[in-house]
Image: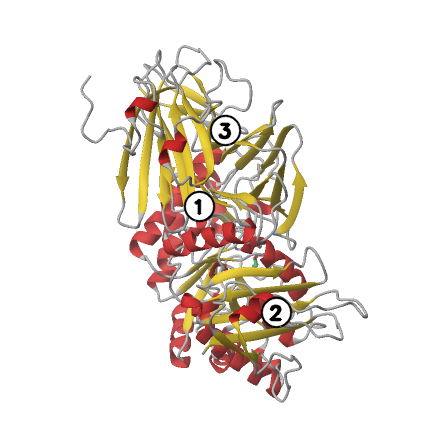
Amino acid sequence: MRVPRVFHWLLIALPLASRAQDAPPPIVVETAHVSLVLAVGKNQKLYQTYLGPRLATAADYLPLPQRHEAYPPAGTDNLFEPALRVVHADGNPGLALGFAGVETAQTSAGATTTTVRLRDPKYPVEVQLHFVAYQREDVIKTWTEIVHREKKPVVLTNYASAMLHFEAPHYWLTQLHGDWAEEGQQQESQLTSGVKVLDTKLGTRAGMYQTPSFFLSLDQLATETTGDVLAGTLAWTGNFRLAFELDNEQALRVSAGINPYASEYTLPAGQPFVTPEFIFTYSTQGKGQAARNLHRWARQQGGTLDGTQPRLTLLNNWEATYFDFDEPKLDALMGDAAKLGVDLFLLDDGWFGNKYPRKDDRQGLGDWQPTTAKLPHGVGHLVQTAAKEGIKFGIWIEPEMVNPKSELYEKHPDWVLKLPGRPEDYYRNQLVLDLTNPKVQDFVYGIVDAQLGQGAAYLKWDCNRMITNGYSQHLGKDQSHLYVDYVRGLYRVLDRVRQKYPHVPMMLCSGGGARADYGGLKYFTEFWPSDDTDALERVYIQWGFLNFFPSNTLASHVTNWNQQQTLKFRTDVAMMGKLGYDIEVAKMTPAELQFSQQAVKDNRRLGPVVGQGDLYKLRSPYEGNQAALMYVGENQQKAVLFGYNLRTRFHETVLPVKLQGLDPARRYHLTEINLMPGQKSALPANGQTYSGDYLLNVGVLVSDSDAKALTSHVLELTAE
Ligand code: GLA
């Protein structure tokens, strides 16, 4: 058989004599420090023979045992979780997959792509396993494509993006769980036999209770700096399923993909079914390194939009006004934003609707015309005011949703997801639009285009409810495509938006942090981790999300949610992420205003360190009453260190924190920043210069030694 030129066995320098003549060499997907090795068995099946630190000698990949079928199909000889289940056109529910070829290429971005083709020997079904290995970032991205040439459609009932196999004495899972206003809560547990599933069936506000990201520690629970750990995350803004199955022989299979719940997919011949991407990295030095790998990948390799660009600081009016505002009030707020020194004013919910003005969350959603009574001169006037003030203007939309009390609903009742013959089921008084319908996609695109077309320089895209009662009038008999096609419809809209507006910054929000995933973040510069802006709670929430997402994607606002907390504490917490404000600037004391203006300036100056630097988590709030973390900028020239006393108790010992990521051979000058006017630093390290070696091995105090709760410090480190 003639092999097309693009297909070739991956050539690695291996002595031919040492492997069976008929078996192709192992397929090695590798980065600078991580290898995933696949091998073709004599039975033509594809096995995963290795996943772990890259081995120094490629020949060592040869003798690895072939125990775990890499992407096991269901119905033939598989005993555990399948990666893929296909019901053929003739009703046969079994699939077998044999190796059919492999293709590799280099990309310009320092990545290697590998495509492995598998084929059923009896049925014309082909599966392609795609891998992109990012050398420098030590991240591998993988997804699967399924295509067939049967005479009639086949039905896919399980279609994982990836399956990975492990053999270790013990396994520990780190997950994020949550609810509204308590997102990103880190939880760790040892896996026991059987299947542990992290999933969601919520459709739109998908990640409300679980997020599609995890750490898997092998052998022992990894710490920030020690232990073997896999970090994985599924790039899908909808129903996901991560399953961890521990079998009778202590082997673990991890499958990641779209949740097949209620989602059998009927696939016509010739139309590839492309799964979402599963992104993972492997660290032998604990969770911190794994997180830094993901962060670097996200910033540098398009995991988030414009990840290496500076972020805009903003003043949002949501908590300051809720729905209660008008044009003069907004004009004044924009003046305040300029006074504060932020880049942008963000107008939140409540600016639209005329027949049913959006005066609360009960009506108007879907009618995206400015409320004339509130904004007689429209959004254009607000854009102009912002320009006069020397700032930009941004606006909130929730384009996938509708209040039944709206003109949109009256005009297009068929655009709404709802079960025929049953009462409508409301959540926040609203329903979900049917994004599987191209007309609805056009409508949603039109909303965005209208706002950006009239000068908005930033969008907050919200999504406040999940799908219940889900039924699409557009899909007809293919109702089980709803959850998949909804997300595809959403991505289609976002693709169009990004074609026309490639760089406008946008925040992804879902009633807080229910859409924290790399499927969405490809199109967004940042996400809103939680409506809970109490700074104490935010330490835990942001800590959780920072495991998987870089700091410049975590929108963190200084607000008045909890006025018992000092403005300094609230600011110090917001500055560990992407700083913003949602506060009444006019009510600040002169000292508070001066403090905040300086914080905004410092934040801008330190953006390259906090937004782009390497994160080191030094003291976890989940393990004690203090938290400390630091960011180290390029070339270890600058670093910013954050210390928080949380629920610190009377006479609780506060020890110095040993720093990480610095150059031991250089000397660093430490300056405390974010001090209230007139406040003197109480930290012994302030104004001192230490060697990196000292800071790494002895450390400094970043907490008050009298152990008051809810105090904090920010130290800037500069190499001499
Ligand atoms: C959601 C968001 C908030 C705010 C409101 C507006 O709850 O998470 O930040 O935008 O909607 O209704």
**Horizontal and vertical percent for residue 4?**
19, 26
The residue type indicated by label 2 comes to: Gly
Q: Residue 426, can we see it?
A: no
Instruction: Specify the label residue 528 is tagged with.
Output: none
**Sequence-wise first label, 1 or 2:** 1
Farthest bottom residue?
678
Q: Residue at x 72, y 59 (%)?
A: 624
Disc nearest the viewer among 1 and 2? 2
Farthest right residue?
650
Q: Residue at x 52, y 37 (%)?
A: 240
**Horizontal and vertical percent for residue 466?**
57, 43
**Image quarter in which the N terminus is found:** top left
> Tell me, what colour scheme is on the image?
secondary structure
Instruction: Specify the label residue 263 is tagged with.
Output: 3
Nearest the camera: 369 or 444? 444
Mark 2 lies on residue? 699
**Sequence-wise first label, 3 or 1:** 3
Ligand 1 is found in which quarter of the picture? bottom right
In the picture, residue 381 is in which quadrant? Answer: bottom left
